[in-house]
Amino acid sequence: MDGKDFLLALDEMLELPSGTLTGNETLETLEGWDSLAVISFIALVDEKLGLVVEGEKLARARTVADLLALAGIAVPA
Amino acid sequence: MVASVIEGVRFAGVVSCVPERRETTDDLAARFGEDTARRIAAATGITARHVVPPHQCTSDLALAAARHLLDRLGWEAGSVDLLILVSQTHDHILPGTGFLLHRALGLGKGAAVFDMGLGCSGYVYGLWTASALLRAAGGRRALLLAGDTTSRLVEPGDRAVAPLFGDAAAATALEADAAAPPMAFALGTDGAGAPYLMVPGGAMRRPDTPAHLTMDGTQVFAFTLREVPGNVRTVLDLAGWSVQDVDRVVLHQANAQMIRHLAAKIGATPAQTVLALAGYGNTSSASIPLALTQELAAPPGGGSLRLLLSGFGVGWSWGSATVTAGPLAACATLVLDADGRAAVSADPATDAGGEALSAGCPAKFA
């Protein structure tokens, strides 16, 4: 899964129109990013990449790009 | 990791009990707003929870379940050699709730009785302890009582926990029987998880702080994904089963999304995976037996079922078991009204009143 696909998956998870997220967004500006979305994000990364994100690192994430970094994916240019 | 196979102990019956009063998504909407309540219900798969009135405790639910179980099995109270009570919501700081139940059930003075302080892993730990002790001590019959009234620890305005937890208790009968199929257990612990699921106040360390449950759901979910799939593989290997051999996968009923995700990770199909939390929420140590009483009340063909049970949570503590159970002489879900009267709610011989209480929340598959 590349960065573009991952952003599309995040769009779907957060019920945003496909192609909305670019990586630069701050998480606190995203209305759907709450404790339920955090759980869905952990499930998404585990399902797509077989990787369990560390809770402490996720708590420090501030931007969508930080989420991609946690998943080990480069932000698309 | 502790891994053990216990032979010669039969899973003889299980009865669960919930209080009558229900809190629904509509009740949550009044507190948190319509959109939030609906989103939480959709994400967790929980649409209602049963909660005790102020005058009822874990022991009241456990007593109703245990009485019904003994009655259906035709077990004399004096024939029970061991009673283990698993709970974190005790009636009193002391004595242990098990002693109140020993008295109320009329068990004999020769019985061994004690409490175990475990939550969502508690049912599997309790099965392991009771079965192992029956074998080691040469006893014949054991009662495992597991339950919590977590609603008493929930601050109603706390969105992280209020929509999730319900109250229930369950009684399980175990009997020494040389012909019983073996049970396998794999257990684990990581005390580093203690801060993430905790009631810090109300006990000796912080006596002046109210006893309120706090939970970091992110940490809980990450922990389960880290530990549970490997633990399940270990117990299946120990039992000599593959996941395809299992008739029912009963994971701790915390959250439907978590159950579906874990089930997929361990290779279980939706048809194998029991989802029985919609009408009850997370009932802590009672969640696995409460799912069992809904699932096993009328097993297809009336034969035995190979069960994979897995509990995980506060501690961190986790454990999985393989159990072959049924047909069971006693298997029912009871509803306890505010006056202490219990009625069967999910039994083929159900009375209409009991049926109406649980008609909206049958067990279903993931």
Image (cartoon, coloured by chain):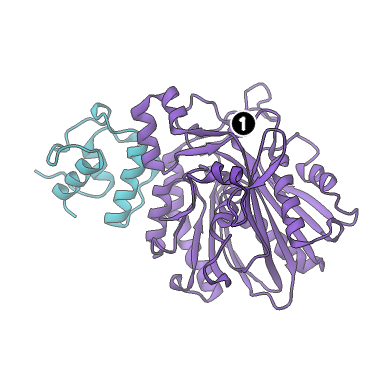
Chain colours: A cyan, B purple
- Residue neighbourhood size for the residue with mark 1, other residues' Cα within 10 Å, grouped as few (<14), some (14–19), many (≥20): many
Residue flagged by tag 1: what amino acid is it?
Arg
Give the secondary structure at mark 1. Answer: helix
- State left or right for residue A10 relative to residue B59: left
Residue B302 seen by the camera: yes
To which quarter of the image does residue B74 belong?
A: bottom right
Q: Nearer the viewer, residue B166 or B214?
A: B166
- State left or right for residue A5 relative to residue B230: left
Query: How far across and how far down the image is residue B157, in percent?
Result: 49, 24
Assign the C terminus of chain B to one quadrant of the image.
Answer: bottom left
Query: How far across and how far down the image is residue A55, in percent?
Result: 39, 42
Q: Nearer the viewer, residue B298 or A58?
A: B298
- What residue is rendered at 50% in x and 49% in y? B253
To which quarter of the image does residue A48 belong?
A: bottom left
- Is residue B237 shown above or below A15? below
For disc 1, the chain is B
- Is residue B335 shown above or below B1? above
Residue B165 seen by the camera: no
To which quarter of the image does residue B12 belong?
A: bottom right
Query: How far across and how far down the image is residue B59, in percent?
Result: 73, 41
Query: How far across and how far down the image is residue B82, in percent?
Result: 79, 57
- What residue is rendered at 56% in x and 62% in y? B298
Task: Residue under label 1, please give it.
Answer: B152
Q: Nearer the viewer, residue B16 or A58?
A: B16
Q: Nearer the viewer, residue B65 or B114?
A: B65
